[in-house]
């Protein structure tokens, strides 16, 4: 739960800040940087497990929650950034120009104008990231070593060890897998309204 929540918050902060910059601000190389970020969408996690592992070893993040959270944020940002930027593109520039005339700084405009208007897409980003992080198996398997830090997706290993010795463990395994899906289903159902509104608005460029 901690990993999923922290990853969702991290992705929300990064994507809203970056989406605001790429959508409403002008700086050199903006389009090239954005394209490079989108190229990361074609990069599967399994293809970079070795670089991730050795980087985390050097950072002494193996067997820590941070060692899972940081890569999860990095891999979720490109997809969510695309959705958030497209949503911000639909916000009229006149609002920002009026705020600038009133003496508002870029960060103040982001905090007072953009964030309140971005609540639907912000909720969508956090829900999707939560579900992806909750269900992720590869990164926790790569990073986590001690049982005390196991994520819920690794918990099934407790039943797998003796599955072939006792048929009852199969039933326990299936029951555990069903229980593991409940939080993501509950989160989705509770935020379904915001999720659908945010995805619909962010999927089409305004």
Image (cartoon, rainbow, N blue to C red):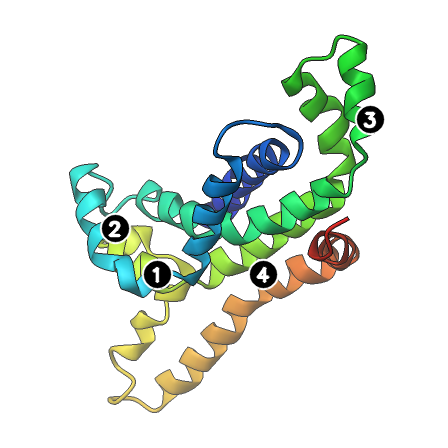
Q: Is residue 1 visible?
A: no
* Disc assigned to residue 95: 3
Residue 116 in sight from this viewpoint: yes
Label 2 and label 3: CA atoms lie apart by: 42 Å
Q: Nearer the viewer, residue 84 or 1?
A: 84
In the structure shown, which secondary structural element does the residue marked by tag 4 occupy?
helix
Q: Which residue is mark 4?
A: 183
First in sequence, mark 3 or 1: give its number.
Answer: 1
Q: CA distance from mark 3 to mark 1?
A: 39 Å
Name the one closer to the observer, 51 or 59. Answer: 51
Of callouts 2 and 3, the N-terminal one: 2
Q: Position of residue 98 (x, y in %)?
A: 83, 18
Crowd tier of the residue under label 4, counting other residues whose Cα lies within 10 Å: few below 14, some 14–19, many 20 or above: some
* Label 3 residue SS: helix
Q: Are marks 3 and 4 in contact (CB under 8 Å)?
A: no
Q: Which mark is residue 52?
A: 2
Which circle, 2 or 4, is nearer the viewer? 2
Disc 2 and disc 1 in contact, CB within 8 angstroms: yes
Q: Position of residue 72 (x, y in %)?
A: 41, 50
Q: Mark 3 or mark 4: which comes first in sequence?
A: 3
Q: Which residue is mark 1?
A: 45
Secondary structure beneath dot 1 equals helix
Circle nearer the N terminus (1, 4): 1
**Residue 135: image tag:** none
Q: Nearer the viewer, mark 1 or mark 4?
A: 1
Say whether marks 1 and 4 touch (CB < 8 Å).
no
Report how far apart the C-alphas of labels 3 and 4 lie in the structure.
Answer: 38 Å
């Amino acid at each position: 739960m901690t990993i999923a929540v922290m990853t969702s918050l991290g992705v929300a902060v990064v994507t809203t800040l970056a989406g605001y910059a790429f959508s409403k601000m002008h700086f050199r190389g903006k389009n090239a940087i954005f394209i490079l970020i989108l190229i990361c969408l074609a990069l599967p996690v399994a293809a970079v497990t070795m670089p991730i592992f050795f980087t985390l070893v050097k950072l002494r993040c193996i067997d820590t929650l941070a060692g899972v959270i940081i890569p999860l944020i990095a891999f979720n940002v490109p997809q969510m950034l695309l959705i958030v930027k497209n949503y911000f593109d639909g916000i009229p520039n006149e609002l920002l120009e009026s705020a600038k005339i009133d003496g508002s700084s870029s960060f103040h405009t982001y905090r007072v104008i953009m964030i309140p208007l971005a609540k639907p897409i912000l909720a969508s980003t956090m829900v999707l990231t939560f579900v992806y992080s909750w269900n992720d198996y590869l990164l926790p398997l790569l990073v986590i070593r001690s049982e005390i830090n196991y994520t819920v997706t690794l918990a099934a290993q407790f039943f797998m060890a003796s599955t072939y010795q006792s048929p009852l463990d199969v039933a326990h395994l299936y029951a555990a897998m069903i229980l593991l899906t409940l939080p993501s289903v509950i989160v989705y159902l509770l935020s379904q309204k915001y999720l659908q509104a945010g995805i619909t608005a962010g999927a089409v460029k305004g």
